[in-house]
Image (cartoon, grey):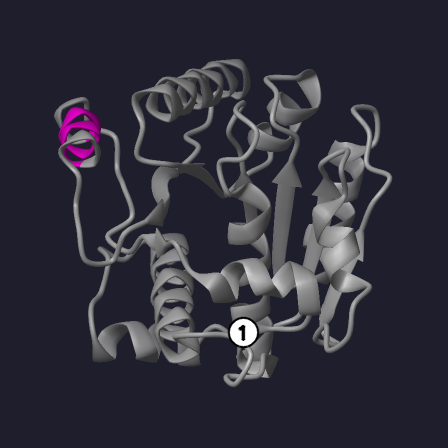
C-alpha cells in the first residue's frame, strides 16, 4: 500500500492543504486513507474534527521521531493509501518519513525562497536514497498559483527544475477560496456550500486533476490527461 509524504522544510508551503485535498479526493472514490498528522500545529487533526470528514479517512496525531516509522508501517499494512503531513523543518522525523515513502510531494509556492527550500527537501530525499539504497520517487507541486497568469518568476523556477531533471506535477493547486474553506468548515470540497464558497466547481476540478496525477505517478504512468486521468481515479478504490 503506497505511502505518500508531503515534505518541505519551509512552513506555509501548502503541505497540509495538499494532503487534505488529496486524501479527501481519494476517499470520495471509495479508498480508505490514513493520514499521519506529524505537524506540531495539527492542522489536519483540526480539519478532521469538523463536520463531514469522510468516514473512510483516519487521522492519527501524536506522531514523534521515535514512533513515525512504526506508525507508517502499521498504517501501510492496513490501509490502501497512507498520507503523511510533516512539519516544516528538516528534522530526523522528516528524514525517517521520507525513507519509507513511495512518493514524496514537495509543495512550493512560485518564489525563489520557496524554490531554495524545495531544493533542500530534494537534497534530504537524496540522502535517504543513499542511506537506504533505494530510489524514492518525488515531484514538485506548485501551490497557490494563479490559474490565469503565469508570472515570470514561476516560469523561471519551473525551467530551473526541468533543467536539473526535477519532475513537477503538470497540475498545480491554484489559489482558491475553497481550499482555505476546508479548514473553516471541514469536510470535502464536494460537501462545501457553493452559495458560501466562490468558484467551487473549479476548485473541485483542480483537486481531482491533482489526485489523478498522484495515482498515475504511483502506478508508474506518465501523467495522463483528460479522460485517462478520470479512468485512473476510478481505479484508485
Find out whether residue 60 is within the magenta segment: no
Residue 60 place in picture, x, y as percent: 81, 51
Residue for point 61% across, 20% down = 89
Label 1 secondary element: helix
Q: Nearer the viewer, residue 225 or 202?
A: 202
> In this picture, is 55 found above or below 88?
below
* Magenta-drawn stretch, dominant element (helix, strand or loop): helix
Q: Nearer the viewer, residue 53 or 28?
A: 53
Q: Nearer the viewer, residue 120 or 16?
A: 16
Q: Nearer the viewer, residue 60 or 70?
A: 60
Residue for point 39% across, 75% down = 199
Residue at mark 1: 189
Determine which quarter of the picture holds residue 81: bottom right
Residue for point 20% across, 68% down = 225
Which image quadrant: the N terminus? Answer: bottom right
Residue 69 visible in this rendered orientation of the protein: yes
Say left or right for 36 vs 189.
Answer: right
Residue 45 place in picture, x, y as percent: 78, 53
Residue for point 59% across, 17% down = 90
Residue 33 visible in this rendered orientation of the protein: no
Mark 1 surroundings within 10 Å by alpha-carbon count, few (fewer than 14), some (14 through 19), many (20 or more): many
Give the extent of the magenta segment. 155-161
Amino acid at each position: 500500500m503506497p505511502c505518500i509524504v508531503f515534505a518541505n522544510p519551509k512552513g506555509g508551503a501548502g503541505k497540509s492543504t495538499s494532503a487534505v485535498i488529496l486524501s479527501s479526493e481519494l476517499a470520495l472514490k471509495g479508498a480508505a486513507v490514513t493520514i499521519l498528522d506529524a505537524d506540531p500545529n495539527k492542522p489536519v487533526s483540526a480539519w478532521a474534527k469538523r463536520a463531514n470528514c469522510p468516514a473512510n479517512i483516519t487521522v492519527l496525531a501524536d506522531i514523534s521521531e521515535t514512533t513515525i516509522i512504526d506508525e507508517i508501517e502499521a498504517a501501510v499494512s492496513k490501509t490502501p493509501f497512507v498520507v503523511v503531513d510533516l512539519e516544516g523543518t528538516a528534522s530526523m522525523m522528516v528524514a525517517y518519513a521520507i525513507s519509507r515513502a513511495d512518493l514524496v510531494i514537495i509543495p512550493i509556492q512560485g518564489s525563489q525562497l520557496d524554490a531554495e527550500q524545495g531544493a533542500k527537501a530534494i537534497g534530504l530525499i537524496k540522502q535517504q536514497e543513499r542511506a537506504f539504497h533505494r530510489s524514492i520517487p518525488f515531484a514538485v507541486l506548485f501551490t497557490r498559483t494563479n490559474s490565469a497568469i503565469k508570472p515570470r518568476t514561476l516560469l523561471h523556477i519551473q525551467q530551473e527544475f526541468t533543467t536539473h531533471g526535477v519532475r513537477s506535477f503538470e497540475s498545480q493547486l491554484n489559489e482558491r477560496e475553497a481550499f482555505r474553506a476546508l479548514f473553516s468548515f471541514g469536510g470535502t470540497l464536494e460537501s462545501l456550500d457553493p452559495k458560501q464558497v466562490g468558484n467551487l466547481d473549479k476548485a473541485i476540478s483542480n483537486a481531482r486533476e491533482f489526485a489523478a496525477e498522484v495515482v498515475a505517478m504511483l502506478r508508474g504512468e506518465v501523467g495522463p490527461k483528460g479522460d485517462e486521468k478520470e479512468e485512473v481515479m476510478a481505479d484508485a478504490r
